[in-house]
Amino acid sequence: MSDPDPKRQMAELEQRIAAAKQAQAPKPRGDEHYSAANLAWRMVIELVAGLGIGFGMGYGLDTLFGTTPFLMLVFTLLGLAAGIKTMMRSAKEFGGNDAAGDAPADREGDRDGD
């Protein structure tokens, strides 16, 4: 009815399980690589969002308190500062990956050349 050798049966079963796991393994995603255009759009959106939120908060507080342009200007400048800070953080995050990988190789190359 079946093969009398249990070790061979177990080896065949393990091979079939490994093949089934490999077939079900998730494929690597290609969209995790950020291009420069994606980063630029992200930074623009962060800056505009900071400006928009600051302007909206200032305008709302101005209408609430009756101080015509004062709070709107203050909060717009605060939103600009927050947007620039977020942009710089994004640029550091993106640039840190490339620069960190290149810097040690350059330093070792300089040591080997001396």
Image (cartoon, rainbow, N blue to C red):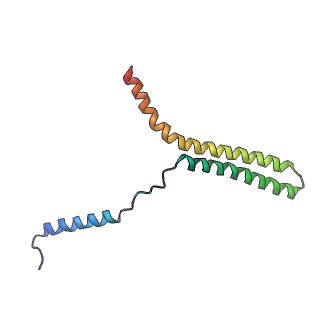
* Residue farthest to the front, as pictured: 37
Q: Position of residue 41 (x, y in %)?
A: 61, 50
Instruction: Quadrant for the C terminus, please.
Output: top left
Instruction: Quadrant for the N terminus, please.
Output: bottom left
Does 52 sit left or right of 40 as displayed?
right
Residue occupying the point 9% across, 73% down: 4
Q: Position of residue 109 (x, y in %)?
A: 40, 27
Residue occupying the point 58% across, 42% down: 91
Count the numbered circles shown.
0
Q: Position of residue 35 (x, y in %)?
A: 52, 48
**Residue 110: quarter of image:** top left
* Residue farthest to the top, as pictured: 114
Residue occupying the point 36% across, 62% down: 25
Q: Position of residue 112 (x, y in %)?
A: 37, 24
Residue 26 in the image: above or below residue 35: below
Does 61 sit left or right of 34 as displayed?
right
**Residue 81: quarter of image:** top right
* Residue farthest to the left, as pictured: 4
Residue 98 in the image: above or below residue 8: above
Does 40 sit left or right of 70 as displayed?
left
- Name the one closer to the observer, 66 or 88: 88
Residue occupying the point 82% across, 47% down: 73
